Each structure stands twice: as C-alpha cells, then as structure tokens.
Amino acid sequence: MDFLLNDIHTDLASTVAAIGEKAGGAAVARAWSEGDRTPALTVYGRLAEAGITGLLVDDDLGGSGAGATEMVVAAEQIGRFALPGPVAETFAAVPCALAAAGASDALAALLNGRPATIATSATARRAAAPVDADVYVLRDGALSSGAVVAEHPSVDPTRTVADVEAGAALGTADERAVAHLGALATAAQLIGLGGAMLDIASEYAKARKQFNRAIGSYQAVKHHLADVAIAIEMARPLVHGAAVGLDGNAPADTDVARDVSAAKVAAADAAYLASRRSLQVLGAIGYTAEHDLSLYLTKTRALVSAWGTPAEHRALILETL
C-alpha cells in the first residue's frame, strides 16, 4: 500500500497553510479567546471557498468530491495554526452526516462557510464549540437539528462544549462512519498542533542562550526535541493509513475501525509529548497566556479526549486482538 502524498496533496496543504498564514496564524485563536470570533469565522469562509469544507461531499451535492486522505492533509495544516471552533466537526463529521441524510439546505450553509458541530450517542456526547455554529444531533442513526441546553468551559479557552437536545428531524446517517471521521480529523489536527509546538520549541532553543551557548546545542535539549519529531513522524503514517482505509482503498481484510483508533491514540500521544517537551524547553514563559505556546498547549489537552479518549480507543483496539 502506498502512503506517499502526491502533488495534489502537497498543493492542498500549501493552500490551507497560506490561508492560515494570511489570517495571522495563532493570532486568530488569540482573538477568539478574547471574545472576537470574526477572524476565525473569516478563515472558515475562506476555507469553504477553497473547497476544504466539501472535501468529503460528492460533486453532485456541491462538494469537492475528494476523500478522507485529502481531509486529513487539510486538517493537519489547520492544526498548525490552532484554528478555534469545531474543526473536526465542520470539515469531517457534519459533512458526512448531512450528505448521508440528504439535508441539502443545511449542507449548503456548511459549504458556504458556516461552521457546524454535532453531538452523537457515543464518542461526542457533547457538541464542541457551538457558538456561531449550526448544531446537529445524531443518535441511533437519526440526524436532527440541535439546540444548546447548557454550555460548559473546557481547558481550551477557545473551545466550549454543550449539552444539546434534538430538534427537527433531517434524515438518517451512519453514526459509526461519522465517529470515525471525527476521530481521524481530530488525530490529523493533533499532528499539526504537535508539529507547530515542535517548531516553536526548536526556534526558541536556537535563540535562547545560557553560558554563551544556544540551549539547543545541549544534548539533553536535542534529545527532547528529537523524541517529539520521532513521535510525530511515526503517528502521521497511521493517520494517512486510516484515511486510505476509510476511502475504501485498503486491502479487503483491513480493520478500518482499529486503524482509526490506532491513529487517534498515536496522534494524541505525539501531540501530548510535544506539549510537555516544548514546555520544558521554553520554561515558565510557556505557561503565560501571552505566549502562543499556551494556545497550543490548551488546545492539545482538549483534543486528546475529543471523539474518544485514548483509553476508549485503546479498548477498541484490544477488542480486535
């Protein structure tokens, strides 16, 4: 099986990265945490214009007609600039659910740049980041519009979660497929977050000096950063491999559900390691809300348990062995 990305994927990643860079990178997340969601909503609109929101939606429904492989490439780049809001939901879970249900009006709003979030029976029992987003509920295969009952803060200042109740029925959707895409998009986002934190720590290690030497020249610091780089590079192929399986291009005997769970566990572990090691390299400044690293730290901690905790996914893997 070939896991190598081609020029189309490289161009896709460059397009998403350019949108994030033009918007100001992590400044978008900082603005959201301070109550200004306009920059982030603008980014969602630009990503929709570039066809990123519709990667999992067929051409005849107004989407890009791509697949999970393209979605994870885009989601990793989105993670690199810590885009706030319901990322995995808007670009993976909700498009899958709305397309399956044939909810054309709701799908049109999504493809035009309106963020969306969803609560399911199992791995996403609460809807993430429901503010300025369309809310949906998928329970026992029945998809409906949703209404927020109670909103709760999380460790990530740009991400709340909400208890929701079902409203008008929209159709039916495969909850298992939605959960797989939500988990895989979150895994890709975590890879991006981990890569960004590694870059932050590496640049700091080259600039910060002690005893007239850059701290990055010390072996202990090199080993810290090398461990993170290895963890990320080992997790990324699992994410790509699971995407290939969801696209139906894996061997017939492939357990796609197990691959998705393995990808989510590996990506979460890699991103969490990146957060810990980056904080060790930067020291106390990394704790401060004024430093961009804090935005990545808190988002990583929130997404580690999103769309299934590591323990839940490890249990799913164990059941297949």
Image (cartoon, rainbow, N blue to C red):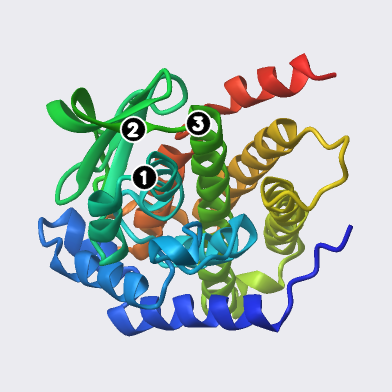
Q: Amino acid at mark 3?
A: Asp
What residue is shown at x 38% (from left), y 76% (from top)?
20
Q: CA distance from mark 1 to mark 3?
A: 12 Å
Give the mark nearer the N terminus: 1 vs 3: 1
Eyeballing the image, is 65 above or below 250? below
What residue is shown at x 68% (from left), y 23% (from top)?
314
Task: Specify the label residue 102 is tagged with.
Answer: 1
Query: Residue 293, located in which quarter of the rendered image?
Result: bottom left
Q: Is the C-beta separation of discs 3 and 2 under 8 Å?
A: no
What residue is shown at x 32% (from left), y 48% (from top)?
86
Label 2: state its secondary structure.
strand
Number of other residues with Cα within 10 Å of mark 1, as a class: few under 14, some 14 to 19, many 20 or more? some
Eyeballing the image, is 122 above or below 281? above
Q: Amino acid at mark 2?
A: Gly
Query: Residue 225, located in which quarter of the rendered image?
Result: bottom right
- Is residue 319 visible in the rendered image? The answer is yes
Eyeballing the image, is 179 above or below 286? above
Q: CA distance from mark 3 to mark 2?
A: 11 Å
Q: Which residue in the structure is indicated by mark 2?
A: 171
What residue is shown at x 74% (from left), y 38% (from top)?
259
Q: Nearer the viewer, residue 110 or 189?
A: 110
